Amino acid sequence: MTIEGRPDIQVSDDYWEKEYARQRQDRMQDCIDDYLQDEKVDPRRAYEEILSCIDDVINHHKKQFDKAVALKSLMMGHRAVDFLEDPELAKKWKYDQIPGRY
């Protein structure tokens, strides 16, 4: 088997970035075409569904952000003092028996 006549497969560093950008645009074009070519879908519905998709992304990331903030807060020691409400823990640690001078 010879290699003569084979194309040079070396590609530039940004080839795959450009290729992905082109494919992403193609996918968006397919979606837009799907909405515009469907006789049952009016422009307002397409508009509202696009906004709904954007809201889904915002809500997803907000939930993840809120969870990360809550975890960081716990890691920094900012949490409710739960042993005062739990009678078993209070009995175990005898917080009600601390001398008055403290």
Image: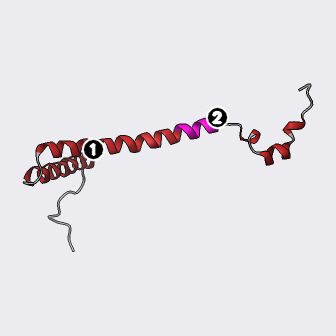
Q: Where is residue 79 in the image (x, y as percent from the top left)?
A: 65, 36
**Left or right: where 25 falls relative to 101:** left
Snapshot quadrant of residue 55: top left
Q: What amino acid type should be assigned to the residue bearing mark 2? A: Met
Which of labels 1 and 2 is toward the front? 1
The structure residue drawn at horizontal position 51% and vertical position 42%, both measured from the top left corner, is 67
Element at badge 1? helix
Between the residue at mark 1 and the residue at mark 2, the CA separation in whole angstroms equals 36 Å
Where is the N terminus found, in terms of image quarters? bottom left
Where is the C terminus found, in terms of image quarters? top right
Which residues make up the magenta segment?
69-77
The structure residue drawn at horizontal position 27% and vertical position 44%, both measured from the top left corner, is 52
The structure residue drawn at horizontal position 24% and vertical position 51%, both measured from the top left corner, is 11
Label 1 Cα crowd, 10 Å radius (few <14 / some 14-19 / many 20+): few
Pointer 1 residue:
52
Q: Where is residue 12 in the image (x, y as percent from the top left)?
A: 25, 47
Q: Does the magenta stretch include residue 47?
A: no
